[in-house]
Amino acid sequence: MSNVAWDGTERIAELLAALPPAPHGWVAAAQELPFARASLDDLLVRAREDSELRARLLADLEAALAEEGIPATPAVISLARIHLEH
């Protein structure tokens, strides 16, 4: 590794260290995202096979997600709607 590349890496590390910590909500969302994504993927697969489940999701997506234990964050809701419309 050249000294130029190393100096750049060190500078990036210094700049990152100077930033304030990420907001708690961002950290919590990042920690929940893998679980939510896996759970949502499973739910959407089941919805393709079960017309009643699909109808329930389309009728009240937020409530259906809550019943499944999936956090109804804006990103999750948006992703679910995209998949349900196709």
Image: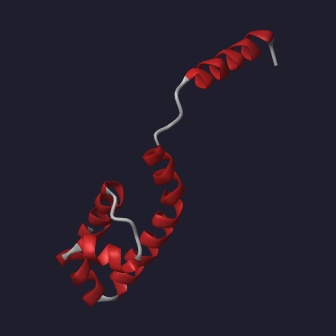
Image: 83 above or below 17: below
Judging depth in this view, the residue of 5 and 9 nearest the camera is: 9
Q: Quadrant of residue 6?
A: top right
Residue at the far top in the pictured view = 4
In this figure, which colouring scheme has been used for the structure?
Answer: secondary structure
In the image, taking residue 9 as reference, residue 15 lies left or right, namely left
In the image, taking residue 35 as reference, residue 56 lies left or right, namely left
Q: Residue drawn 40% across and 70% down?
A: 70
Q: Residue drawn 49% across and 52% down?
A: 28
Q: Residue drawn 54% across and 55% down?
A: 31
Give the percent coordinates (x, y) of residue 51.
Answer: 27, 88
Give the percent coordinates (x, y) of residue 40.
Answer: 42, 70
Give the percent coordinates (x, y) of residue 7.
Answer: 73, 12
Question: Which of the image's four quarters has the C terminus?
Answer: bottom left
Question: Which of the image's four quarters has the N terminus?
Answer: top right
Image: 70 above or below 75: below
In the image, taking residue 73 as reference, residue 15 lies left or right, namely right
Residue at the far left in the pictured view = 59
